[in-house]
Image: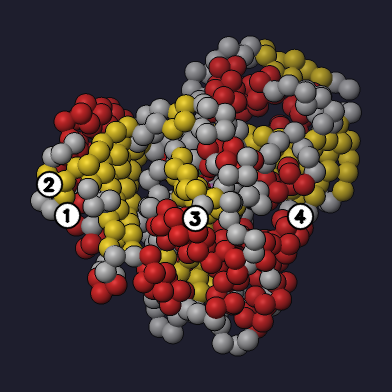
Amino acid sequence: MNIKTVATTAFPDQKPGTSGLRKQVPVFQKPNYLENFIQSIFDSLEDYQGKTLVLGGDGRYYNRQAIQIILKMAAANGVGRVKVGQGGILSTPATSCVIRKYNAFGGIVLSASHNPGGPEGDFGVKYNIGNGGPAPEKVTEAIFARSKVIDSYKILDSLDVDLDSLGESKLGDMVVEVIDSVNDYQELMESLFDFELIKQLLTSGKFRMCVDSMHAVTGPYAHAIFEKRLGAAAGTVKNGTPLADFGGGHPDPNLVYAHDLVEVMFGDNPPDFGAASDGDGDRNMILGSNFFVTPSDSLAVLAANAKLVPGYKDGLAGIARSMPTSQAADRVAAKLGVDCYETPTGWKFFGNLLDAGKATLCGEESFGTGSNHIREKDGLWAVLFWLNILAVKQQTVEGLMREHWQTYGRNYYSRHDYEGVDSDRANTLITNLRNAIPTLKGKKFGNYEVEYSDDFSYTDPVDGSVSKQQGVRIGFTDGSRIVFRLSGTGTQGATLRLYLESYEADTAKHNLDAQEALEELIAIADEVAKVKELTGMDKPTVIT
Ligand code: VG1
Ligand code: CO
């Protein structure tokens, strides 16, 4: 075996963000850049010698090259076996599933999720731990600390591995096992949902659906599960072949970027159900005919109806949502008599709650929903959950949502993103807000009075770890909220996220457009934070 130790110089900028290390492709292509980060991961881990690692990615540009490098480094660092998705393809939820099923010590997911791909697009590396979930902050901090002082890495001098043929081969002493990208994941889905009932719905001739995989990783999964297994009509899955540049689009399932699907669902004679997923398959957008389901509402509706679904028939231990996610799920938790947890943004904060059995369902406003079946959010899982509920209740998407609002009231919700803001200006905006916090309580803005304001800090109820400065919150006496935070997944400049929420109990007032319902709060946000002035933008880049 020919193991080389290569001298290298540390890069100062390998700090993982909300979800792994994300940089533009040319940055990852710099000599030693990827190698340094991967070696920093191995150097920060213990007890993995001879054990199994899971490896795959969303198929974006540089995926295959990166996989070859990582395989050779894994062999040189003493990993026993790597399970790698065929063609280098594994969605984020499938990676989590495989790590758990085969007791791997961890996994590496190559993805920048919803960020665009291609030679000038973004690339990313996420490390997941043995529970199948994103590495918690203490692990990512150790990796970052190591990356700042690293001076060499180990790599096997060998030929590339064939990633396209299923089966085992040897790379030095290490076994490389190319696995079917879909099988393990599909089996897990079959164990949770009533596939026969969903099949009846999809083959009844009375229910049409459209699934947009956005040229990203879910294509093979959606084809196998919806068309092949569940009998949905051929052509149900659109944009179903993963492309290295996602066809030039943003693989981000929202009303702006999933425009193909939006045209179908809001066009003439729309299907009954529409769904889209993101680059790495962990996000989902749910649409009905002429109807958009806000992700926060999706979490609440799944929670309220969970008992109808076989995998959740015994009820929920608790619900967890990220702080900026609307409080619609809190109302369901209260009615169910279970705890509701509020965590910082990013799936890594749900891991402990799920492992400890404190929460069963989790969700984020950013089109992420998931459960204790794995330790990542899961786009197609959410689609199946919706289909299972619709099949049991024989309702439309809109009908189910309206019934929910009637019972619980409606949490009007929207997120305004200001992308590509100058970093200094974005930091000034947040610093100004932090400074204003002590002066806000009791202040009146039109109909609204500030009840509290803070910079969200989270103490993990399981291990006591504290995460500070997770977003500035302004809460009003009627339960409405405005939240400001900066994105931790972008690669250029800063992205300001403004989250807006107001509650309406009166069913007669559930027909407003969210932007209309939130108009006054939007104006207050600008007054308090000087958003337009400091970003230099008249309006948000993306509204969801
Ligand atoms: C965004 C979302 C967050 C999500 C994260 C990763 O982070 O807001 O809710 O967990 O992306 O999702 P940020 O820091 O940019 O707001 V994914 O599908 O990009 O892995
Ligand atoms: Co994603």
Tag in front: 4 or 1: 1
Quarter of the image with the C terminus in it: bottom left
Q: Residue at x 30, y 42 (%)?
A: 483
Residue 232 versus residue 488 in the image, above or below: below
Q: Position of residue 435 (x, y in %)?
A: 21, 26
Tag in front: 3 or 2: 3
Task: Give the amino acid type for the residue marked by disc 2 in the picture.
Answer: Phe
Q: Residue at x 13, y 53 (%)?
A: 447
Task: Give the amino acid type for the residue marked by disc 4 in the picture.
Answer: Asp
Residue holding disc 2: 445
Residue holding disc 1: 520
Tag 1 secondary structure: helix
Quarter of the image with the N terminus in it: top right
Task: Give the amino acid type for the residue marked by disc 3 in the picture.
Answer: Gly
Of residue 53 and residue 400, the one placed in the foreground of this image is 400
Residue holding disc 3: 337
* Mark 4 CB lies closer than 8 A to ligand 2: no
Q: CA distance from mark 3 to mark 2?
A: 34 Å
Tag 4 secondary structure: helix
Task: Give the amino acid type for the residue marked by disc 1 in the picture.
Answer: Glu
Assess whether mark 1 and mark 3 are in contact (beta carbons under 8 angstroms).
no
Where is residue 444, by image quadrant?
A: top left
Quick one: label 2 or label 1, which is nearer the N terminus?
Answer: 2
Quick one: label 3 or label 4, which is nearer the N terminus?
Answer: 4
Residue 391 versus residue 540 in the image, above or below: below
Quick one: label 3 or label 2, which is nearer the N terminus?
Answer: 3
Residue holding disc 4: 184
Tag in front: 2 or 1: 2
Quick one: label 3 or label 1, which is nearer the N terminus?
Answer: 3
